């Protein structure tokens, strides 16, 4: 008799679930995926599409998107050999986890942190060493270093600024981890454009064990285009390139990236707006009875309410979609609300005040 098909699959599948976004992806006021509320202006979309029209659609793109990689390397001021582009930074996370992990290897992940890290570690049959954040949701750097040494981990993944917790490590703290620990360190800087802290890209020449991850989905407002990058020294780059899916980025992503980087004032203006709104929202939310607000170094705020499920459901019924992050350790009854347009933020405030 044949076995049930489940017995034929990777046993790790029993421990993971398909990715889902609670509440869906449609709403009048959408504050649940840390996206930018500012789409590209039509004139820029038109010029990108004009260029895309002249590309050969019948031909494969390059194995790796070398044009996009060269464009981003120039923007960062690093050599082109230090940059690799992916179809969203999620794809790069898969690539890097495949390169760094396998059965019996150990990965240190501060908790809570971006949920995909745990999932990929389990899929790679690696052992996860979790290090809790402090109660105020800041990183416990000493605990990370001592756990990394004690457990002899091979790989350390830091979402800094941290999704969903909202706080960052300083440049010096990351350097302490990279210089002290005998492990590959991945610094996921998805929210760096909103941060008070400096990027650690400048450290890639000095430390052969550091990889920096970037996404164009947040401050650069290109979530729909799927563009991410890893930046590291050429030696480590040659290794992490090995498991990369070939031809994963299309020509449109490369052209769009160049269009946005050439018009970077769109990004800086949007970031300025969102940071001013973050500050205003923090002050306004702090004044609402029954709402506790955490400091944030990102484009979202974490609030603690009396009953997160009830508030999530009431907001959703009123057309405002936020993320219920109360299932994460240390985040009981917490909601994650990204900063939107002034009127969207005001709608959230009005509703929270009325509950
Ligand atoms: C910390 C972090 N890393 C990576 C990603 C993935 O972004 P993308 O695949 O859109 O580049 C996200 C998205 O929410 C994130 O929060």
Image: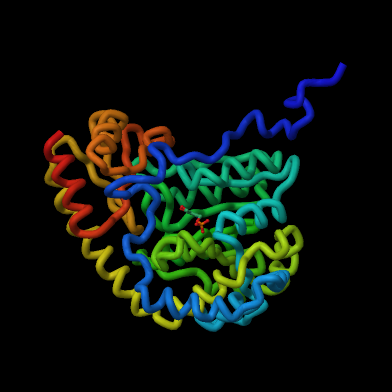
Say whether residue 82 is left or right of residue 353. right
Indicate the position of residue 184 as horizontal and vertical percent values: 65, 58
Say whether residue 295 is left or right of residue 15. left
Specify the farthest residue to the top: 1
Q: What is the count of numbered marks?
A: 0
Indicate the position of residue 213 as horizontal and vertical percent values: 55, 63
Residue plotted at (36% across, 73% down): 42
Q: Is residue 162 above or below residue 331?
A: below
Q: Look at the image and name its color scheme.
A: rainbow
Q: Does residue 179 appear in the picture of this structure?
A: no
Location of residue 100 (image quadrant): bottom right
Indicate the position of residue 116 as horizontal and vertical percent values: 55, 45
- Quadrant holding the N terminus: top right
Q: Nearer the viewer, residue 250 or 77?
A: 250
Residue plotted at (28% across, 52% down): 295
Residue plotted at (20% across, 46% down): 348
Indicate the position of residue 236 as horizontal and vertical percent values: 70, 67
Q: Nearer the viewer, residue 210 or 260?
A: 260
Q: Nearer the viewer, residue 250 or 204?
A: 250
Q: Is residue 239 above or below residue 296?
A: below
Say whether residue 161 is left or right of residue 244. left
Say whether residue 140 is left or right of residue 72. left
- Quadrant holding the C terminus: top left
Residue plotted at (59% across, 81% down): 54
Q: Does residue 74 appear in the picture of this structure?
A: yes
Q: Is residue 63 above or below residue 106?
A: below
Location of residue 170 (image quadrant): bottom left
């Amino acid at each position: 008799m044949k076995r049930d098909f489940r017995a034929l699959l990777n046993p790790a599948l029993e421990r993971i679930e398909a990715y889902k976004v609670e509440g869906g992806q449609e709403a009048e006021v959408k504050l649940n995926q840390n996206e930018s509320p500012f789409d590209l202006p039509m004139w820029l979309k038109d010029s990108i599409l004009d260029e895309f029209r002249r590309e050969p659609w019948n031909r494969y793109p390059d194995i790796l998107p070398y044009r996009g990689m060269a464009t981003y390397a120039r923007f960062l001021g690093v050599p082109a050999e230090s940059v690799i582009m992916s179809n969203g930074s999620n794809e790069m996370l898969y690539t890097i986890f495949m390169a760094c992990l396998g059965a019996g290897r150990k990965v240190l992940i501060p908790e809570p942190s971006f949920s995909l890290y745990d999932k990929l570690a389990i899929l790679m049959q690696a052992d996860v060493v979790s290090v809790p954040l402090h109660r105020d949701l800041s990183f416990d750097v000493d605990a990370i270093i001592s756990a990394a040494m004690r457990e002899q981990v091979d790989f350390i993944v830091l979402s800094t600024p941290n999704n969903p917790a909202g706080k960052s490590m300083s440049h010096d703290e990351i350097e302490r981890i990279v210089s002290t620990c005998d492990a590959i360190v991945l610094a996921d800087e998805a929210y760096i454009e909103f941060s008070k802290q400096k990027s650690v890209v400048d450290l890639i020449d000095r430390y052969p064990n550091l990889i920096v991850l970037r996404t164009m989905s947040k401050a650069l407002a290109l979530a729909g285009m799927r563009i991410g990058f890893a930046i590291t020294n050429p030696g480590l780059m040659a290794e992490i390139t090995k498991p990369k899916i070939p031809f994963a980025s299309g020509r449109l992503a490369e052209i769009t990236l160049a269009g946005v980087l050439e018009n970077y004032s769109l990004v800086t203006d949007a970031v300025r707006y969102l940071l001013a709104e973050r500050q205003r929202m923090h002050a306004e939310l702090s004044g609402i009875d029954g709402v506790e607000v955490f400091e944030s170094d990102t484009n979202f705020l974490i609030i603690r309410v009396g009953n997160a499920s009830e508030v999530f459901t009431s907001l959703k019924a009123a057309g405002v979609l936020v993320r219920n992050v109360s299932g994460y350790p240390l985040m009981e009854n917490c909601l994650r609300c990204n900063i939107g347009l002034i009127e969207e933020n005001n709608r959230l405030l009005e509703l929270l005040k009325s509950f």
